[in-house]
Image: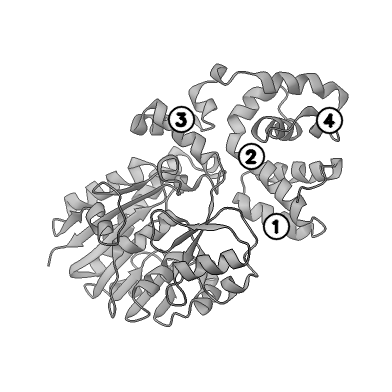
Amino acid sequence: MKARFTPALFAHAEAVLGQLLRFDHPADAVVSRYFREHRQLGHADRAFVAETVFAVLRRGRSLEARCGEPISDRRLLLVALAVTRGWSQRELAPVLRANEEEWLAAAKAKPEADLAPAVRCDLPDWLYNRLEAQFGAEETLKLAQAVNLPAPLDLRVNTLKTSREALLERLADEGISAVAGPLSPTAVRLREKPALAKHALFLEGAFEVQDEGSQLLGYLLEPKRGEAVVDFCAGAGGKTLLLGALMKNTGRLYAFDVSDKRLAKLKPRLARSGLSNVHPARIEHERDTKIKRLAGKVDRVLVDAPCSGLGTLRRNPDLKWRQSEESVAELTVKQAAILDAAAKMVRPGGRVVYATCSLLTAENDAIVDAFLASHPDFTLTPASAVLAKHGIALDGDLLRLLPHQHNTDGFFAAVLDKKA
């Protein structure tokens, strides 16, 4: 169902964009709060507002270059509708002022080739330069084009309650079009984006919403029945739930995080999942006594390290404007300290998986290289060999998922095994 395009609806989009471009808070939180304050907006109206403001966040630089002076939120929205969403002047007529028609036609006609590479990729200069150094100009353009598209909606089957085949069958019965994910054995990809929060299958714990790339981290860790396992930076627990299911609800699974708020989001998910082997706990920092008590006692630790999140730009396009070279440098110090603390928990013969949803070498390869140089008791186990055991065919000693190649979020992971 399409929203009725009116000046009032356009004004809502303008109001939301004004708040977003201050970059005080994460974009999804700003949009959610606005919708809570304006409950009169229907489902189609909300979809219009969200998609349009996110188009501006994704394509900000190239849209600004097309706008000409003066740049305003109104102009950015009009160009976003005309260029990224392909609306005609006739469709925009309800809000277009007489003196804007000529300007908009010129903005739309401006050739892409006239834009500087970073502008064409809609990336800040510092980020473009880093990605170009890693991937080359051509590959960076492909990557940028992929992260400027919305992400598909992926589910993870809760294998404690159902199978992928059974879930696909039940979704089809309900008229929800879905296919098996090409990489993860537990992934289901939906063709549309239906509202699922009140769906019976969701409420009974048959699935969780989780990017397919994220699901592979569980298969790299390979937790076994009856083991002691730690999800070190558990957040809202998406990966914790996967690990618990892989452990067949046995053993002890610790879900540690520094944020009460994030762990609170795990509670209802845990209740739906049917897991009883998960022990969530807040920690102060990576040197917390709860961590020290586990020294040398744990079989496996997953470190999904706090990172720039630049692999998730399809979902969180504001991150490219909110992160900086300075914030990445601060994160790398934290990442190294957390990985070091995780390694201390592991028994001889145990495993640490270090992962981020970043695209940057500084947060990925550089952290692992430095760790291996200072921890001779650990070795890098090829990720491809571990995944092959689970029927997942991906090349490389390190897991490197890229939106334009794998149609997942950008993920990096290294399997670090402690010598027995």
Q: CA distance from mark 4 to mark 3?
A: 32 Å
The amino acid on which the numbered mark 3 sits, given as a three-letter code, is Leu
Please say if the residues under marks 4 and 3 sit with CB atoms less than 8 Å apart.
no
| Image quadrant where residue 305 sits | bottom left
Please say if the residues under marks 4 and 2 sit with CB atoms less than 8 Å apart.
no
User: Relative to residue 230, is residue 29 depicted above or below?
Assistant: above
Q: CA distance from mark 1 to mark 4?
A: 28 Å
The amino acid on which the numbered mark 4 sits, given as a three-letter code, is Leu
Please say if the residues under marks 1 and 2 sit with CB atoms less than 8 Å apart.
no
Which residue is label 1 attached to? 33
The amino acid on which the numbered mark 2 sits, given as a three-letter code, is Ala
The amino acid on which the numbered mark 1 sits, given as a three-letter code, is Arg
Which residue is label 3 attached to? 141
Q: For label 2, count other residues whose C-alpha is less than 10 Å away and answer few (under 14), some (14-19) or many (20+).
A: many
Q: CA distance from mark 3 to mark 1?
A: 34 Å
Q: Is residue 184 left or right of residue 167?
A: left
Horizontal and vertical percent position of residue 67: 69, 24
Q: Nearer the viewer, mark 3 or mark 1?
A: 3
Which residue is label 4 attached to? 96
At x 14% / y 60%, what residue is drawn?
Answer: 377
Q: Is residue 283 visible?
A: no
The one of 268 and 1 positioned closer to us in this rendering:
1
Horizontal and vertical percent position of residue 354: 31, 56
Q: Earlier in the sequence, mark 3 or mark 2?
A: 2
